[in-house]
Amino acid sequence: MPPPGTRWIGTSWKMTKSLAEARRYATALTDAARPGRWTGLQPFLIPPATALTTVRDALPLSAGVLLGAQNAHWADSGAWTGEVSVPQVADAGARLVEIGHSERREHFGDTDDVVHRKVRAVLRHGLVPLLCVGEPASVRAAGGSVEHVLGQARSALAGLDDASSVLVAYEPVWAIGEHGTPARPDDVAGVVAALAAELGSRIQGVLYGGSVDRANMHELLAVDHVSGLFVGRAAWDVDAFVAILDGAAEA
Ligand code: 13P
């Protein structure tokens, strides 16, 4: 685990990029990752499962970029057609596994119980869970954001003896994606403060994600208790990701 105070800055490619595109991105990121350039940061990159080994092979450990998977099943192996397990993504190079992204909760049946089982599986194999939580717009409008998000986090981490490697990403559903409304720092501060107050001593840190880009990254990174950023679209171009990393390193 990186030292306390490290800022985690990463991107998920979601369901984008061919292998050729993945290789070009990883090679360019490797070239950009000069020693000392991103001091104080822990960059991470979460390709689709198809591209994990391609990225791993193009991105040497010396580049200092942690690789992740977008999802993994709770079982280690077996008859689960279409799924990949934590040992499989670890074998392919992942050191971090994203669990419970709102797109999975909405479209793929990742209930709180499923999320909990997946977090346990990631921890059992010694990888870092990147647990995504966030409220839909209707919950925000009704003033229930904090309770909703704390409920998701409590359920995911219930009964765990050691959650010290867990990263929580606060990603309000209404702020994610091309139809999302970018959050303002005030929208983020209360929820992140509540997560930090309840879980801060148990987990590794709280990241913010949802329509983060080069224009709003500084104000979001400056919110109390935000220890990193989880970027989607704005980092799908490697030069843009490098610019975001440079911006965070300067902050
Ligand atoms: P966007 O930055 O594209 O809104 O996506 C955020 C996200 O879901 C990261 O996981």
Image (cartoon, rainbow, N blue to C red):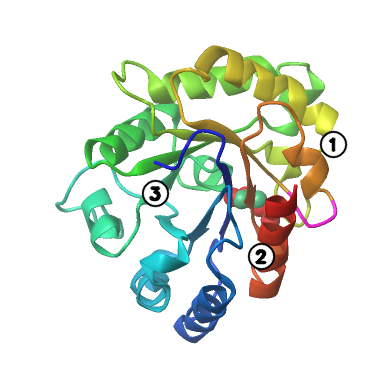
Instruction: Check disc 1 and report its element: helix, strand or loop.
Output: loop
Q: Is residue 180 visible?
A: no
Looking at the picture, does residue 163 appear above or below residue 211? above
Q: Please identify the quarter of the rendering in which residue 111 is found.
A: top left
**x, y (%) of residue 152?**
52, 24
Judge from the rendering whether residue 179 lies leftward or rightward of residue 198; answer left or right: right
Q: Over which residues does the magenta segment extend?
A: 211-215
The answer to which of marks 3 and 2 sits earlier in the sequence is: 3
User: Which dot marks residue 119?
Assistant: none
Residue neighbourhood size for the residue with mark 3, other residues' Cα within 10 Å, grouped as few (<14), some (14–19), many (≥20)? many
* Cβ atoms at labels 3 and 1 below 8 Å apart: no
Judge from the rendering whether residue 204 lies leftward or rightward of residue 212; answer left or right: left
User: Which dot marks residue 96?
Assistant: 3
**x, y (%) of residue 114?**
37, 34
Between 250 and 108, the one nearer to me in the picture = 250
Closer to viewer: mark 1 or mark 2: 2
Looking at the picture, does residue 133 appear above or below residue 78? above
**Residue on which disc 1 sits:** 184
Name the residue located 49 percent from the left edge and 86 percent from the top edge: 20
- Residue 249 within the segment the image draws in magenta: no
Instruction: Check disc 3 and report its element: helix, strand or loop.
Output: strand
| Distance of label 3 from label 2 (alpha carbons) | 19 Å
Q: Is residue 231 visible?
A: yes
Name the residue located 30 percent from the left edge and 46 percent from the top edge: 73
- Which image quarter is the N terminus in? top left
Three-letter amino acid code of the residue under disc 2: Phe
**Residue on which disc 2 sits:** 241
Between 157 and 207, the one nearer to me in the picture = 207
Three-letter amino acid code of the residue under disc 3: Leu
Residue neighbourhood size for the residue with mark 1, other residues' Cα within 10 Å, grouped as few (<14), some (14–19), many (≥20)? few
**x, y (%) of residue 213?**
77, 55
| Distance of label 3 from label 1 (alpha carbons) | 28 Å
